[in-house]
Amino acid sequence: MRASGRSGWIRLGIAAGLGTAIWFSPVPEGVAPEAWQLLAIFLATIVGIVLEPLPMGAVALLGIAATTLTRTLTVGDALSGFGNRVIWLVVMAFFISRGFIKTGFGPRIAYWFVRLLGRRTLGLGYCMIATDLVLAPAIPSITARAGAVVFPIVRSVAEAFDSRPRDGTARRAGAFLVQSAFQGNLITSAMFLTAMAANPLAAQMAADMGIGITWAGWAYAALVPGLVSLLVVPLVLYRLYPPEIRRTPTAPDLARAKLAEMGAMKRDEWIMLGTFLLLLTLWIFGKRLHVHSTVAAIAGLGVLLTSRVLSWEDVLNEKGAWNTLIWLSTLVMMASSLNELGLIPWFSGRVSGLFEGVGWLPAFLALSLIYFYTHYFFASNTAHISSMYAAFLGAALVASRSSAISSAARLTTGPVRRPCCTAPATSSSERGGDSALSSAS
């Protein structure tokens, strides 16, 4: 929650104090002074985002101002993030997602699933997850999907079986449904590039290291682990956190009543459906059709605007999109600049050195586990990705190259000169290996 008054000033002082301390601390050997100064501003910005003395966008703007006022970056470099194509893809997806909520098409999808699978409480859990999965590619806000679409359906169904959070009846059905929807929401947020606002940040950091990740490539890599998780998690919850009511034979009737109340699909809903299918087609086959995913999203928004499904006022009032544009552009700019100034490769080499001689697979598993559990120290995925993803990805890449070089040395009769492993790949063969690693990860 954003702080106010004296508390806000204290939190802002903590962030600024951390940045100042790093700024005036000795610069490590092998690190450019500009990189160290930008790291100080970057970490101060991250701490500000976590502590929230001001809204996230306001903290990001302070970070941009600091990079230019201290002459760490030029004005052009400081504003370069606002020209990032992937960021604009997510912003367009925010605008498009408004159509699902405004037309009522999102809730209709949920009631369709309840009518089909809702005779058991376990089936209702899968209904909530299936709804989230369908909407995830076009709604890049976890809060919007869960709060505006899924949760109202969960609450309506739970109350139909006399399950409420404050009168001791939550375990009848509602608690299980909320847990299923929550866990499913977290999984679907990782399955598509446009399913969470922070995902493009990770994609851009990977791109800075020579790893290209497209919308279709991300979805393809996440398809199997994502679907398996979505299938298994409700079953695990059903065992560990079982609902008291196992059968819900009247839930489909409730869904039919809600659908009857909504009436037949209206013109705007049909246009929303058509636009959604068009976007999925262009996002999946965009590379073959030579259509960039961002251009496809802009065209989709154009369809919704020209057909009057959305108005320009709807676009202007989508505060989450404009807020995301500011903070995400800022973090992408800083992360990319840190990589260009050599700090990320330097740090990645240091981290990977800890796993010298261990082998790539154990090193990768160790890095993954450390990255996973350090999330407990962060208040948001955005702060976590911004702070650690680039360094840990770089360390994994360096460890993989070191392992490959060691293997080559064992397979040859002569000595193999070991190159420096503190910089990202630049050759086409190395980048191909990085892309394979990205897909595997």
Image (cartoon, rainbow, N blue to C red):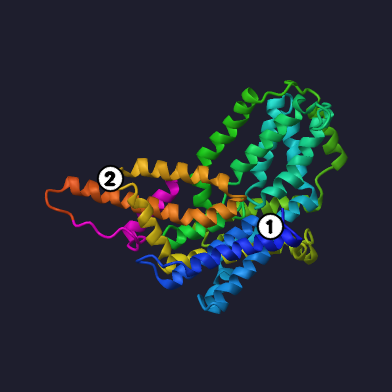
Residue occupying image coordinates x 40% and y 58%: 347
Q: Is residue 403 left or right of residue 367?
A: left
Indicate whether 242 appears above or below 303.
Answer: above
Q: Which residue is mark 2?
A: 357
Q: Position of residue 69 (x, y in %)?
A: 57, 78
Instruction: Tell how many labels.
Output: 2
On screen, residue 379 versus residue 164, left or right, reads left
Q: Is residue 151 magenta?
A: no
Q: Is residue 295 visible?
A: no
For marks 1 and 2, the one nearer the N-term is: 1
Whether residue 175 is visible to the viewer of this picture, yes or no, is yes
Magenta-highlighted residues: 417-441
Up the image or down, 323 lies above or below 385; here it is below
As drawn, which residue projects farthest toward the right? 261
* Residue 53 drawn at (x, y percent): 69, 60
Q: Name the amino acid type tagged 2.
A: Gly
> In this view, which residue lies farthest toward the left?
413
* Amino acid on which the number 1 mark rests in the picture: Phe
Q: Residue at x 70, y 36 (%)?
A: 128
Q: Which residue is mark 1?
A: 94
In space, the residues marked 1 and 2 are separated at their CA atoms by 46 Å
- Of residues 156 and 362, the one nearer the viewer is 362
Label 1 element class: helix
